[in-house]
Amino acid sequence: MRVPEFAAAMGYGDDLVCKVESGKRIPQRDYLVKADEVLNAGGLVAAAWEDVKKVRYPKTVRDIAKLEARAVELTAYGTHNLHGLLQTADYMHALFEMRRPAHSQDQVERLVAARMARKVIFERDPAPELCFVQEEATLRRPLGGKMVLRRQLEHLLELGRMRNIEIQVMPIDRAVHAGMGGEIQVLKFADGTAVGRAEGDFGSRPVSELKHLRIMELRCGIIRAQALSPGESLAFIEQALGDT
């Protein structure tokens, strides 16, 4: 079948079909199911979804998702924007759309979908222990507008009330701050191993060497002690919501 004929039978535009065939666009599951019907493939095309869903996201995102899927404990400190796992879809859109040089709309949608897919960590049973420390500025900056910020703050309050999640706020008026070096994230696994990454340290790459992890864990512990407690932080977020 030629592209126009196939596109008409699929109910999609010629441009989308060409992008899928050339590998410039990753097909959604509905697209594969419909293609299977149109081509009378007996389930062979639809079955490709199991492979497609593994590669539809950038490799770095897939690597992060694999680590998060194994983690029993996650500690993260964020500076410029909210941690990806805490973000709403609207916040993600705003964040990716303001990038310069600009992403194409297809790239934005792909990146948002990839980040949203990582949220399955909240559905795991048994649930991992998750701790996030966020700079006050990340709760004040109205990325995407005030309504996006309001929904984001409401989402943080919902997450912060879950038993396995702690959200702490680092107030801007702290005179002593152990996190001035930048973002940090440490993931620990059931077998006792761990992986961490600290912005500006060790080449800003993920590391698993014990001596490097000890530095990150020490810094995370001090940052948590310097930040507001989880209870104080929820009250702070509620106040920030009232201020928007």
Image (cartoon, rainbow, N blue to C red):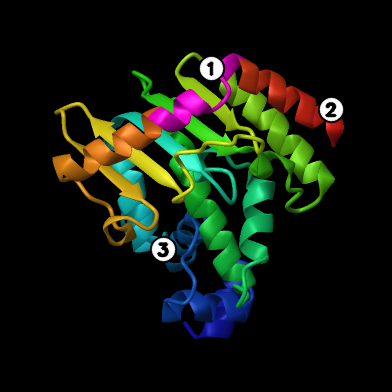
User: Considering depth in this image, is 142 or 144 the residue closer to the camera?
Assistant: 142
Of the numbered discs 1 and 2, the one sitting upstream in the chain is 1
Q: CA distance from mark 3 to mark 2?
A: 56 Å
Magenta run includes residue 225: yes
Question: Which residue lies under the disc numbered 3?
Answer: 40
Q: CA distance from mark 1 to mark 3?
A: 47 Å
Report x, y in % for residue 153. Answer: 71, 33
Residue 170, located in which quarter of the rendered image?
A: top right
135 relative to 203 in the view: left or right: right
Residue 140, located in which quarter of the rendered image?
A: top right
Of the numbered discs 1 and 3, the one sitting upstream in the chain is 3
Of the numbered discs 3 and 2, the one sitting upstream in the chain is 3
Q: Nearer the viewer, mark 1 or mark 2?
A: 2
Q: Residue furthest toward the front?
A: 175
Residue at disc 2, secondary structure:
helix
**Exactly how many numbered labels are in the figure?**
3
Residue 221, located in which quarter of the rendered image?
A: top left
Contact flag, marks 1 and 2 (Cβ < 8 Å): no
Question: Which residue lies under the disc numbered 2?
Answer: 242
136 relative to 27 in the view: left or right: right
Q: Main SS of the magenta segment?
A: helix
Bounds of the magenta segment: 222-231
Residue at disc 3, secondary structure:
loop
